[in-house]
């Protein structure tokens, strides 16, 4: 998920005269709000999600999981389980190839051991075996009858425990990256650093220096649909996998890698996906269901229970963060010294790299050092979660910035404006920003009614800002014209928040036809060309670019065909308002249907595919303002008003842009105020249900007001930036700053629960 | 295991099936009756994705044994639309972009219908509390609440639509 945008920097000089108004006026379909193509199926219950696939003779598969946080597997005896009623197949680590000797990447080795333990279990819930039986209850009973002998080891559950001298090691063979051997600490997989200028000089030039330490807790993406997969391996060695994921091509390559199968022998069909937020970019049940299906000769469905989702699918990292900022009396930032320590879970790979790159990317700071550490511990392997790594780092930086603003008596928006990254600023992570819209988001919030309005009693107001790269990447689009002249747009990008609509809008705009007549669908891995995962806010940008490219080629093809039909020169034909037109108006214009009807005589079926690796993602920024009200008796925080401004580049379907903004904010509110993983000392998760892991509900929240800022991305034909992720980045900092404003105390530890707020109030008064 | 014979009315159809005592109504609806629009998000009554109308009360199907449905009347998401005409709630959810992934949508529509059946003119706060048992992780609820309020208004204005 850590993708930088090196290529976009080359586009800095692009003429950018399009303003929001003229851009909107120039489009007929882009910027409108049609009903999404998959909408009716989703409001009538017809849409098929991961668990909704039913095949004749299908077995049900379940997983046996480790009760220990850290243990060596001495033996596994499956004989009794295999003999139980209804059982058709039992698999363990011994049924998978050992990738550690195969030249596979470290990530592949980790993934293979995460989906099925070998030798050692590294967290409570780590998979040790899987069973397929006629019914789920039979499969569960058999899984419970598997006898695993463990040699239990000491475990570590927190960053401090994991890195303490003499801590038990999860991976004794692990070689730390980026750390000199003499500086090595236990369980520390890697160190990343971004540095510029001279910190000593920077702090010497500061009139005010503020340093704070923060902790954030692991939180789960909390998608409502549990992981699910249905596999069907046929006797000719071909396999079909139906599953809900953010990228069926990635699922195919990861699954076949851990199984040691040929990649193209497996066809993966994307089910509707019931939320992912990054958490469905990796594999859990998929390779298990494939292997169980192969062993049993029957289709196998596997669905996680909610407690399995919490216990064993990836949350995002908890962290320890230290931030020290220096500024002049006038408010210019002179230095930033930032240390980030992120939980990776049981295998290396926390998003600390992206956290280090994004931590101060909103600001132009002459001297800085951002150092990050990736630490393994006996918890589930973390997975991507919306702008991975960025929100926790932003929480810390935005909190200290708020302190600087208070210390200097400068309005928090003014302080940020004074230091804001603009076009031409060298980003803290390397490249120079092309045209970006950070300042525009700050100005939008400064001028909105919310920021100008008075506060009530016990209320406080906070500002937060955030940055996310957004990414480009590989996408394929095929556009087919049917015999009746209607259009199908197919891509390989699972639609997680309405992207089918955006693809249809691009096609409607390019070809001048009614968006409501366009089919917009997602092809399986055998049907459409490759696409990277739906992640990094990349689909509208990159898959959209492929759709646009295909439609432009098709327009050219349609003009060529019309010229043939009229027997005139190609140059005398233009495509206007969905029709081929003779430049001299001497012919009756031809609609898509007219051209389609004669396709056989003008070169055959009308179909265009465009495949590309889109460079030039457009950086995304968001600024948010929140009002909270604190109950001084209980310490309860109510969010009473929230406004978020975000640079979308160009909003293709504004409703779904707003939806991404609102959804990100509310996840951030949950992370700020309630959500946290709580572990028992034995390493088991204490709150593995939605009852105890409380995500925000409707009655906790106000409306989330949105301001879409449109500063077009110069590298995209429609100016798209990508909108899915940055909306969560500012929120925790904004909420913390609002709480400080309300109670006069800085909370540096998430979640900012009523207990912690009461403690802060009482300590302050004591 | 002895299986119990259950007869009930689901979305206007008289149906019957055999169930064992431990089977939830959610599993029976999904696996035996093929009503896959009823979603499972948790299985413990905490997410509302499995919401159905059971004898006119909005109910988490995962918390009820299938055997308890004997002689009951059930409405699931599959029974919300009137033949080919969408319920105003469904139409307003579509137009208001009240769904992103859509997995929570069946539960929200059923819970919202239950609310509007008993209170045709709810305030925003009443809608928020009526839907507090339904989790949505995608939308932040904003567009869901607005769509329910819009549907309520439309239904009040259009007496031709039966609630
Ligand atoms: S599945 Fe029934 S409430 Fe969640
Ligand atoms: S739309 Fe995805 S959970 Fe509600």
Image: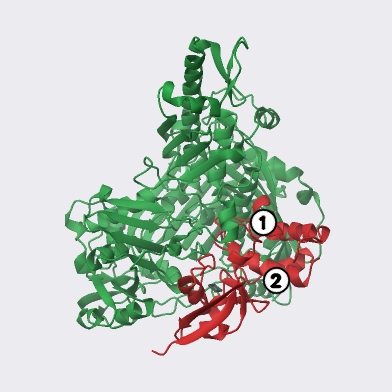
Residue nearer the viewer, A171 or A553: A553
Q: Is residue A409 left or right of residue A105?
A: right
In this structure image, what is the colour of chain B?
A: red
All told, the count of numbered labels is 2
Q: Is residue A429 left or right of residue A381?
A: right
Quarter of the displayed picture in which ligand 2 can be seen: bottom right
Residue B68 at x, y = what percent? 56, 85
Chain where mark 2 sits: B
Q: Is residue B156 left or right of residue A200?
A: right
Mark 1–mark 2 contact, CB under 8 Å?
no
> Dot 2 corresponds to which residue?
B114
> Dot 1 corresponds to which residue?
B85
Q: Earlier in the sequence, mark 1 or mark 2?
A: 1
Residue A266 appears in the figure: yes
Q: Is residue A510 above or below residue A332?
A: above
Task: Identify the chain drawn in green.
Answer: A
């Amino acid at each position: 998920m850590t993708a930088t945008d090196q290529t976009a920097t080359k586009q800095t000089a692009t003429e950018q005269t399009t303003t929001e108004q003229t851009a909107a006026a120039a489009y007929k379909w882009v910027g409108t709000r049609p009903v999404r193509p998959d909408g009716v199926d989703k409001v009538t219950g017809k849409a098929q999600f991961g668990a909704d696939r039913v095949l004749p003779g299908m077995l049900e598969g379940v997983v046996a999981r480790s009760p220990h946080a850290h243990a060596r597997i001495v033996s596994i005896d499956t004989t009794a389980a295999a003999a139980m009623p209804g059982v058709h197949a039992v698999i363990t680590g011994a049924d998978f190839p050992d990738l550690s000797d195969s030249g596979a990447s470290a990530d592949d080795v980790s993934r293979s051991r995460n989906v099925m333990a070998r030798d050692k279990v590294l967290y409570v819930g780590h998979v040790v075996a899987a069973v397929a039986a006629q019914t789920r209850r039979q499969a569960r009973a058999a899984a419970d009858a598997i006898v695993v002998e463990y040699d239990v080891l000491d475990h570590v559950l927190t960053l401090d425990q994991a890195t303490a001298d003499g801590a038990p090691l999860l991976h004794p063979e692990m070689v730390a990256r980026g750390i000199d051997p003499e500086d090595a600490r236990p369980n520390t997989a890697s160190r990343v650093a971004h540095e510029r200028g001279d910190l000593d000089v920077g702090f010497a030039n500061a009139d005010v220096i503020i340093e704070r330490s923060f902790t954030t807790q692991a939180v789960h993406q909390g998608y409502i649909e549990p992981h699910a997969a249905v596999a069907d391996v046929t006797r000719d060695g071909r396999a079909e996998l139906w599953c809900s994921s953010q990228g069926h091509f990635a699922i195919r390559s990861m699954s076949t890698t851990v199984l040691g199968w040929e990649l193209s022998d497996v066809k993966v069909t994307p089910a509707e996906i019931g939320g992912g937020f990054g958490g469905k970019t990796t594999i859990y049940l998929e390779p298990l269901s494939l292997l169980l299906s192969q062993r049993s000769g029957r289709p196998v469905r596997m669905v996680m229970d909610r407690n399995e989702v919490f216990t064993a699918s990836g949350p995002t990292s908890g962290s320890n963060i230290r931030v020290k900022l220096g500024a002049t009396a006038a408010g210019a930032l002179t230095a930033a010294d930032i240390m980030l320590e992120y939980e990776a879970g049981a295998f290396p790979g926390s998003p600390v790299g992206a956290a280090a790159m994004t931590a101060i990317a909103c600001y132009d700071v002459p001297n800085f050092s951002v150092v990050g550490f990736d630490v393994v511990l006996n918890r589930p392997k973390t997975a991507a979660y919306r702008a991975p790594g960025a929100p926790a780092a932003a929480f810390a930086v935005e909190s200290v910035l708020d302190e600087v603003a208070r210390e200097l008596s400068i309005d928090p928006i003014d302080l940020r404006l004074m230091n804001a990254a603009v076009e031409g600023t060298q980003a803290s992570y390397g490249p120079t920003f092309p045209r970006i819209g950070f300042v525009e988001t700050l100005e939008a919030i400064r001028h909105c009614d919310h920021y100008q309005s008075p506060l009530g009693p016990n209320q406080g107001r906070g500002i937060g800002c955030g940055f996310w790269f957004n990414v480009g990447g590989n996408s394929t689009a095929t556009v087919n014209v049917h015999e009746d002249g209607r259009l199908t747009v197919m891509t390989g990008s699972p639609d997680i928040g309405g992207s089918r609509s955006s693809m249809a809008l691009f096609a409607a705009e390019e070809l001048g036809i009614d968006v409501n007549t366009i089919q917009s669908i997602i092809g399986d891995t055998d049907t459409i060309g490759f696409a990277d995962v739906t992640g990094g806010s990349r689909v509208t940008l990159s898959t959209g670019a492929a759709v646009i490219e295909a439609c432009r080629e098709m327009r050219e093809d349609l003009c060529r065909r019309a010229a043939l039909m009229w027997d005139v020169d190609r140059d005398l034909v233009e495509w206007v308002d969905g029709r081929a037109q003779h430049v001299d108006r001497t012919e009756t214009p031809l609609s898509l249907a007219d051209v389609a009807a004669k396709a056989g005589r003008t070169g055959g079926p009308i179909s265009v595919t465009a495949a590309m690796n889109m460079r030039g993602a457009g950086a995304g920024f968001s600024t948010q303002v929140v009002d909270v009200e604190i109950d001084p008796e209980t310490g309860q925080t109510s969010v009473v008003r929230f406004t978020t401004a975000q640079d979308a580049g160009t909003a293709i379907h504004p409703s779904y842009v707003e939806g991404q903004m609102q959804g990100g904010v509310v996840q951030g509110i949950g992370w700020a105020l309630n959500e946290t993983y709580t572990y028992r000392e034995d390493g088991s998760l204490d709150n593995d249900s939605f009852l105890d892991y409380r995500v925000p509900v409707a009655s906790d929240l106000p409306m989330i007001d949105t301001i879409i800022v449109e500063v077009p991305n110069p590298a995209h034909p429609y100016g798209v930036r990508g909108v899915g992720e940055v909306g969560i980045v500012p929120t925790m900092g904004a909420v913390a700053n609002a709480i400080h404003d309300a109670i006069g105390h800085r909370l540096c530890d998430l979640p900012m629960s009523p207990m912690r707020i009461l403690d802060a109030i009482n300590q302050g008064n004591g | 295991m002895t299986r119990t014979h259950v007869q009930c009315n689901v979305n206007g159809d008289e149906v019957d099936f055999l169930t064992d005592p431990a089977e939830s109504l959610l599993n029976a609806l999904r696996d035996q009756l093929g009503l896959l629009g009823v979603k499972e998000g948790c299985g413990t009554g905490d997410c509302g994705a499995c919401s159905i109308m059971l004898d006119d009360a909005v109910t988490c199907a995962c918390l009820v044994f299938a055997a308890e449905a004997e002689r009951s009347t059930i409405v699931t998401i599959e029974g919300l639309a009137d033949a080919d005409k969408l319920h105003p709630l469904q139409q307003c959810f579509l137009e208001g972009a009240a769904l992103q992934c859509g997995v929570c949508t069946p539960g929200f529509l059923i819970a919202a219908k239950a609310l509007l059946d008993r209170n045709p003119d709810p305030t925003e706060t009443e809608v928020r509390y009526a839907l507090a048992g339904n989790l949505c992780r995608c939308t932040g609820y904003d567009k869901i609440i607005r769509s329910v309020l819009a549907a309520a208004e439309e239904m009040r204005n259009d007496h031709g639509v039966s609630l």
